[in-house]
Amino acid sequence: MDFVDYYSTLGIAKTASADDIKKAYRKLARKFHPDVNPNDKEAHKKFQQINEANEVLSDPEKRKKYDQYGKDWKHADQFEKARKEGGYNTGFGGQDFGGGGYTYSSGEDSDFSDFFESLFGGSRKRGGQQRKFRGQDYNAELSLNLSEAYATHKQTLNVNSKTVRITIPAGVENGQVIRLRGYGSPGVNGGPAGDLYITFVINNNTGFRRDGNDVYKEEDLDLYTALLGGEKTIDTLSGKIKLKVAPETQNGTRVRLKGKGFPVYKNEGTFGDMFVTWTVKLPVNLSDKQKEIFTELSKMS
Amino acid sequence: MKNKNLVPAEDFCLHHNIEYSFISSLGESGIINVTSVQKSTFLQVDDLGKLEKFMRLHYDLQINLEGLETINHLLEKIENMQEELRLLQNRM
């Protein structure tokens, strides 16, 4: 467990007055409040830290104990050991001093640090808004392979020990968020339940590059097929297909296969396109005979 | 009136201990939708999260209505840009 310097968290001196603390806290709270920093985990963490620092420093009793502990920090190991054995009797731990400063709410539950808990006791949750009406929203992450995202399928999730069966429509994208209304915590005083937000994290386990509904793939083509034309069997997301190769196909030529891309989200039966880029491979380890023919060809052009 | 998509504004104000005028101001500025049915005012369930957010900004951070309108506009911009960034990152 690391010592937490609450003074540096708020950017104030150890001699700061109650008013200095209040001012510093308010300024930082406006800057890092989660409501003005959407999807910014760093800002959320910082907000939690400044709330914790304010909780301690704005309460004279807590601040006094914290200052004392800070001085004795070099004995922290002994303190920790004694605390675990239950033999340390300094008045730390298990107490709630009440009163104290006002802590801004963020609409989310957040735990204070282990340091705070060891000093001021219990496993207390602070910083979260006390729910009075609508239930709290839940956030969950769901990892899928790209091949799974190709087809609509059902999946069972465990969210806060509640089993939720969801249908994942084909075509979800990496980082996409879906909202399941009413799957958050129940409301109070007749208020509606919160929502469940699921963020999809899609791992590409295929040889295709996806861009929205289109997919891209590079395919090797031997010199002779490129020159004379022919057929090549290639993999698509929906299975193998035979593709015609036009004679005199240049290296880097891109072919569009309409409707062979990714399914369009919530638009059943509609697909993006697949783009195949031909990479012409030149023959190596030529035999004398081949060299002779190529020389002859070079003289002809 | 029972409609699972609507919540009486009065209930919301009562449980959060806030003035109705705050809700009507947010409605007038277009931040949330306020629906009137037979002399009663209702809030859309889907707007409650947003309303709670602006309530925190107003009552906790002391931001006035003009500030809330600006924040609403900027948050929409941030969210659109984050979405654009996500799509661009997926292309890479």
Image (cartoon, rainbow, N blue to C red):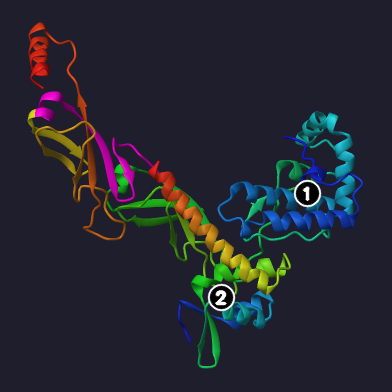
Q: Which residue is more in the foreground, B91 or A185? A: B91
The magenta segment: A202-227
Tell me if residue A89 can be seen.
Answer: no
Q: Nearer the viewer, mark 2 or mark 1?
A: 1
Helix, strand or loop at label 1? It is helix
Q: Is residue A160 above or below residue A296?
A: below
> Residue B92, image x and y in percent?
40, 41
Helix, strand or loop at label 2? It is loop
Callout 1: chain = A
The residue identified by callout 2 is A190
Per the rendering, the mark at residue A286 is: none
Per the rendering, the mark at residue A53 is: 1
Q: Is residue B84 left or right of residue A70?
A: left
Q: How many marks?
A: 2
> Residue A100, image x and y in percent?
83, 58
Residue reaching furthest bottom?
B38
Q: Are marks 2 and 1 on the same chain?
A: yes
Q: Which amino acid is tagged 1?
A: Ala
Q: Which residue is more in the foreground, A73 or A287? A: A287
Q: Is residue A231 left or right of residue A66?
A: left
> Residue B26, image x and y in percent?
60, 77
Q: Is residue A105 left or right of residue A5?
A: left
Q: Is residue B13 above or below residue A270?
A: below
Q: Is residue A210 magenta?
A: yes
Callout 2: chain = A
The residue sitting at 21% across, 58% down in the picture is: A269
Tell me if residue A141 can be seen.
Answer: yes
